[in-house]
Image (cartoon, grey):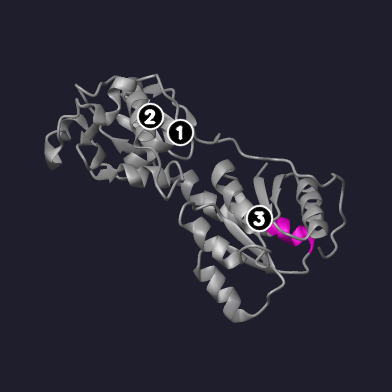
Amino acid sequence: MAHLLVVEDDPQLRGALVRALRDKGHAVATAPTGMAGLDAAVTHRPDLVVLDLGLPDVDGAQVLRMLRAVSDVPVIVATARDEEPEMVSVLGAGADDYIVKPFGAAQLDARVKAVLRRLGAGAEGAEPLRVGGLSVDVAAREVRLDGEPVDLTPREFDLLAHLARRAGQVVSRRELLAEVWHQPLGGADKTVDVHLSWLRRKLGETALAPRYLHTVRTVGVKLCAPEERGSGGTASDGSTSDGSTSEGTASDGTASDGTASGGSAPDGPVPDRPL
């Protein structure tokens, strides 16, 4: 079952889309405006967004550009605009598919499944990310250290996976806030520090005796194998800048990672007629 977000201002059409997609087995959340849709996409992280362009507050094309600055969630644009230049522009801005109204429920469902299948194929076949004895399987969301499983929260996993993709490179806290917490305008550095502290604990290390996670003061953090510890000018991170003194004492105050579902429209089967 896919978790979808429908951003559509027309209440009748929005209700029809919800009923149609639920009838096809999807969980659906909705937003009536562009900014509400952007907030829901960042906060609840659905599997796919169905986005109208003619929204009352912000044009859907601009919403798409803002969303692409903070998220790679798949987006299907569903609109009455059928001009080719518009289609080319929106697809170039990051849309994964473009469907012109009116369309049938079966066609939208087929496009949703096709986009998810296409984008999921690479992740399913990808090899786990390996850094020394640390293995991060992004598709299965599993972490092993020297062959033993490591139990991480969803946020801790996302943080470690991002660092593993950039293994050997210094990653700034600002980048982590944007890519892991989806706060492109920045936030509290302490959020990153506390999660790094919790992550260190689960990897069996400390700030004073790091093995994989090394803080480069005033710059950021680097994930590297223990034998690579001396490379790249990594500094000792025993200061409070790494958040080690706050282990287990603070939360990040961010929104839940859970995917939203639901919607105000009533359930019920919908024939495959134009929506």
Please tell me whether residue 2 is drawn above or below residue 76 in the rendered image.
Answer: above
Instruction: Name the residue beneath numbered marker 1.
Output: 155
Q: Earlier in the sequence, mark 2 or mark 1?
A: 1
User: What kind of element bears circle 3?
Assistant: helix
Mark 1, Cα crowd under 10 Å, few <14 / some 14-19 / many 20+, is some
Question: Which amino acid type is marked by label 1?
Answer: Arg
Spatial separation of the CA atoms under disc 1 and disc 3: 26 Å
**Image location of residue 1, percent across then percent down:** 68, 41
Mark 2, Cα crowd under 10 Å, few <14 / some 14-19 / many 20+, is many
Q: What is the chief secondary structure element of the magenta stretch?
A: helix
User: What kind of element bears circle 2?
Assistant: helix
**Image location of residue 244, percent across then percent down:** 29, 23
Total labels drawn = 3
User: What kind of element bears circle 1?
Assistant: helix
Q: Which residues are magenta?
A: 104-110
Residues at discs 2 and 1 in contact (Cβ within 8 Å): yes
Please tell me which residue is depicted at 21% across the width and 40% down the height of the picture. 218
Q: Is residue 47 visible?
A: no
Q: Nearer the viewer, residue 222 or 121?
A: 222
Spatial separation of the CA atoms under disc 2 and disc 1: 8 Å
The quadrant holding residue 196 is top left
Residues at discs 2 and 3 in contact (Cβ within 8 Å): no
Q: Nearer the viewer, residue 166 or 172?
A: 172
Q: Earlier in the sequence, mark 1 or mark 3?
A: 3
Question: Which amino acid type is marked by label 2?
Answer: His
Question: Where is the C terminus found, in terms of image quarters?
Answer: bottom right
Q: Nearer the viewer, residue 264 or 74?
A: 264
Instruction: Name the residue beneath numbered marker 2.
Output: 195
**Image location of residue 249, percent across then percent down:** 40, 19
Instruction: Name the residue beneath numbered marker 3.
Output: 112
- For marks 2 and 3, give the one nearer the viewer: 2
Residues at discs 1 and 3 in contact (Cβ within 8 Å): no
